[in-house]
Amino acid sequence: MTARILVMPGDGVGPEICREAVRVLDTLATDHGLDIMLEEALVGGAAIDATGDPLPESSLEAARAADAVLFGAIGGPAWDDQPRDKRPESGLLRLRAELDLFANLRPAILYPQLAHVSALKRDIVAGLDIMIVRELTGGIYFGKPSGMHKNANGKREAFNTMRYDEGEISRIGRAAFDIARARGGRLCSVDKANVLDVSQLWRDVMNELGREYEDIELTHMYVDNAAMQLVRAPKQFDTVVTSNLFGDVLSDAAAMLTGSIGMLPSASMDANGKGLYEPVHGSAPDIAGQDVANPLAVILSVAMMLRYTLKRPDLAKKVENAVGYALDRGLRTRDIMDDEKQIASTQEMGGAIVDMLR
Ligand code: NAI
Ligand code: MG
């Protein structure tokens, strides 16, 4: 069946990098029999300028109808003085909520050719390949009650509620176990079960699921220790699963182990395999329109789409290998440059990947 893919380029470098990702998808369609149909829709500042709304109804409908969304980036100084619900970012937040994308997948991969980009010692990070699975639609960011008021002593007081039910935990748990199974077979669940009741339930449910996934090695780690271990010896991890708050912090820390924001893809998935795929970086207004942005983060997001939604792990591997070959050949965009390598523009890097795929 033909898969429908909606491309939402957005703002800043979004359109430039998405153009390269679309060339990759087109090449896979023409040369490798990938059965897809591409559409495009407005989102973010581009949508505000055209319609006044960062996520117009027509874009939301197109996203609902699609099997996968490829998302560029949104935001920029042009829209910074808008009220919060009219800012580009609210378009992405609404899209994630409307599509019920509860599983956020953030790989932290450091290609061995780029070990110089990391702030950490080469032997600690070279060849790093971990996957952080973060619960995205529950937990303390959404728990009620929340708010701020004056308490009985006349002091300002603020509160949020960390809440998960076992259904929410087991659905992210299952997603993570399945991912671990397709990777190295090891899953580390990160919580704070020594202090938080929510974490005790989290740990209980993970252990219960573990009995259904006997081929997966399940371990548990407290979040404070996980933060230390990520910096001390990150290669001990394969797949990590954690709640919304802990995952927000740990996934950014893990991303920075690699030091190369232009290389990091992500996915946000629903329960039926539908996903929104996007680079981790933003719209990079400082370099937009200059043909210097690194398109590899969004191209690696295409690889994730191939693996998780389109169920073509063979083609995902092809794309990832093509990226490896381009780096082997010495091609570097500005953000991952080192001495004596060849500087590549956005289009040259995209073109190199397309050539490899042919
Ligand atoms: P950013 O990720 O856009 O840029 C941070 C730094 O990394 C900049 O120096 C930029 O030039 C560089 N960079 C980012 N992507 C790159 C690429 N592909 N190749 C080479 N260099 C790259 O984060 P920043 O500057 O904090 O935010 C800029 C705008 O993006 C803001 O409006 C922000 O709200 C928005 N944003 C959007 C996100 C999204 O669409 N999911 C995520 C993060 C920020
Ligand atoms: Mg964050």
Image: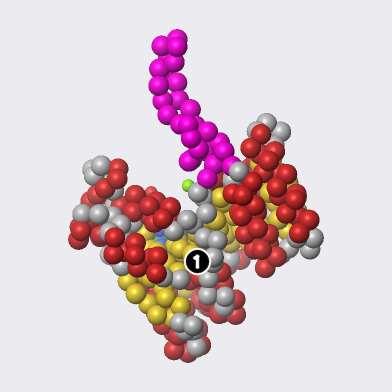
- Residue 249 picture location, percent across and down: 54, 44
What residue is shown at x 68% (from left), y 41% (from top)?
A: 201
Q: What residue is disc 1 on?
A: 274
**The furthest residue to the top:** 153
- 260, above or below 318, in the image: above
Q: In this rendered view, identify the residue nearer to me: 114 or 165.
A: 165
**On the picture, is 349 further left or further right than 271?**
left
Which percent across, then down, holds residue 222? Answer: 69, 40
| Whether residue 240 is situated above or below residue 275 in the rendered picture | above
> Magenta region: which residues?
138-164
Q: Secondary structure at mark 1?
A: loop
Q: How many marks?
A: 1
At x 49% / y 57%, what residue is drawn? 101
Q: How far across and down, in percent of the image, does residue 333 sit?
A: 42, 67
At x 67% / y 68%, what residue is drawn?
Answer: 182
Name which residue type carries label 1: Lys
Asked if residue 154 is among those painted magenta in the image, a careful observer would answer: yes
Around disc 1, counting alpha carbons within 10 Å, would you say few (fewer than 14), some (14 to 19), or many (20 or more)? many
Left or right of residue 218: residue 66: left
Image coloring type: secondary structure
Task: Answer yes or no: is residue 134 visible.
Answer: yes
Question: Is residue 60 part of the magenta span, yes or no?
Answer: no
